[in-house]
Amino acid sequence: MQLEKNELRNGRQRRNRAEIMIPALLLVVIFGCSKKPDLAGHWEGVLDVSSAKGAPGVPESGKLKVIFDIKKSDSTYAGTITSPDQNPQPINVDSVTLKEDSVSVQVNQLFVNFAGKMSKDGNEITGDFKQGPMSVPLTLKRLNVPGSLGD
């Protein structure tokens, strides 16, 4: 009889713990997984434009470093693009959007459109960099740079 009471008590204790743990785990999963990636920050990548070697502004190596500095104000993104191998002066971007993991950046002055997908950890964007008729793959990596617009 005593053994049955102990088993019954232990069963209730386990059930009570489960009743507490399951909702707690659900909250962790819901809030932990619903965190949206943040696009704000300093992003760098290298364009391989070796097919355009010899064209004005294209270095002999055929590689061009591209930097996007993105900041967020309320729910709107803004930023600049810099190609230090061509011109060290940043140029304002016209639009920056992030929908789920899809990123789009437009720079009308340069006829540039970048469209890519952000990695799950939010530290890399892989996509296509288009300028006029040229389209090349570009992977941007988030770097922690003090003083960048994303800080």
Image (cartoon, rainbow, N blue to C red):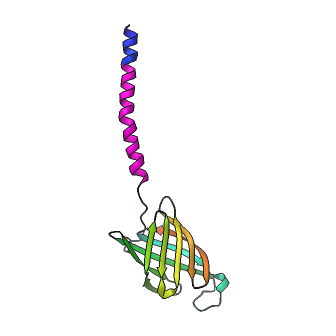
Specify whether residue 140 is painted magenta.
no
**Quadrant (top left/top right/bottom left/bottom right) for the N terminus:** top left
In percent of the image, x 41 and y 73: which residue is there? 70
Residue at left 40%, top 22%?
A: 11
Question: Residue 107 location, x and y as percent?
Answer: 47, 82
19 over 72 or under it: above or below? above
- 26 part of magenta stretch: yes
Q: Position of residue 69 (x, y in %)?
A: 43, 75
Residue farthest to the left, as pictured: 74
Magenta stretch, residue numbers: 9-35
Q: Is residue 87 visible?
A: no
For the residue pair 111 and 138, the one nearer the viewer reads as 111
Q: Residue at x 54, y 79 (%)?
A: 65
Instruction: Identify the main secondary structure in magenta.
Output: helix
Pick out the residue farthest to the top: 1
Which residue is situated farthest in the bottom direction here? Answer: 56
The extreme front residue here reads 99
> Along the line of sight, which residue is nearer the eye, 15 or 72?
15
Image position of 121 (left or right of 51): left
Instruction: Choose top left, top right, bottom left or bottom right for residue 23.
Output: top left
Q: Is residue 49 visible?
A: yes
Count of labels in the image = 0
Q: Position of residue 148 (x, y in %)?
A: 39, 74
Is 47 left or right of 151, judged from the image as shown? right
Residue closer to the observer: 85 or 105: 105
Residue 26: x and y in percent read 40, 43
User: At 57% across and 80% down in the image, what residue appears?
Assistant: 130
Q: Quadrant of the C terminus?
A: bottom left
